[in-house]
Amino acid sequence: NLREIWAPNLGPERAARGWPWAAIVRGGGRLAFGSDWPVVPIDPFLSLHVATNRQTRDGDPPGSWLPEERLGLAQAVEAWTSGSAYAEHAEQIKGRLQPGMLADIAVLNRALKNTAPDQIAQTRVEATVVGGRLLFER
């Protein structure tokens, strides 16, 4: 719980610098998103929601937390895809959809780029393809 436990334990000065995603990007750094499961939910759409809104799924804190650190949706998706591939030194084979790359993909129930920021967390996976094989279909 960010406001009730984390921020008070860290103190206001350090809490004001928490998760400086936009500052890292502005400074030329690359982001690599992943899950801290089991500490936080493994849901990548909740992570995209938090990165773009700086709020929980329920809209806490009101007005967002450190709104200047919000990412655009394209930046957050890049952190989950090509950024994570870069972090594991695998950017030559995965992280982007292009010829010659692995084509492990998730088919979503909506186009994220057409989704309102406060609705990103409600996105669902309809199918997954790994190694050219359909492994999951809703």
Image (spheres, rainbow, N blue to C red):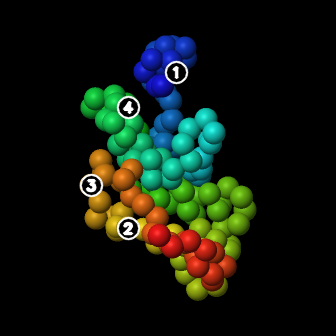
The disc at residue 116 is 3
| Left or right placement of residue 109 versus residue 80 in this view | left
Q: Which residue is under mark 1?
A: 6
Residue 119's spot in the image, x, y percent?
31, 52
Q: Quadrant of residue 124?
A: bottom left
Where is residue 78 drawn, in percent x and y? 50, 60
Question: What is the C-alpha distance between the residues marked 3 and 1?
Answer: 28 Å
Residue at which label 2 appears: 109
Instruction: Tell me the distance, in whole angstroms, between the alpha carbons under discs 3 and 4.
Output: 20 Å
Q: Earlier in the sequence, mark 4 or mark 1?
A: 1
Sequence order check: which comes first, mark 4 or mark 2?
A: 4
Which tag is nearer the camera, tag 1 or tag 2? Answer: 2
Could you tell me if the residues under marks 3 and 1 are in contact, i.e. CB atoms within 8 Å? no
Q: Is residue 26 visible?
A: no
Q: Secondary structure at mark 3?
A: loop
Q: Residue at x 34, y 28 (%)?
A: 61
What residue is drawn where x is 28% and y is 64%? 114
**Earlier-in-chain disc, 1 versus 2:** 1
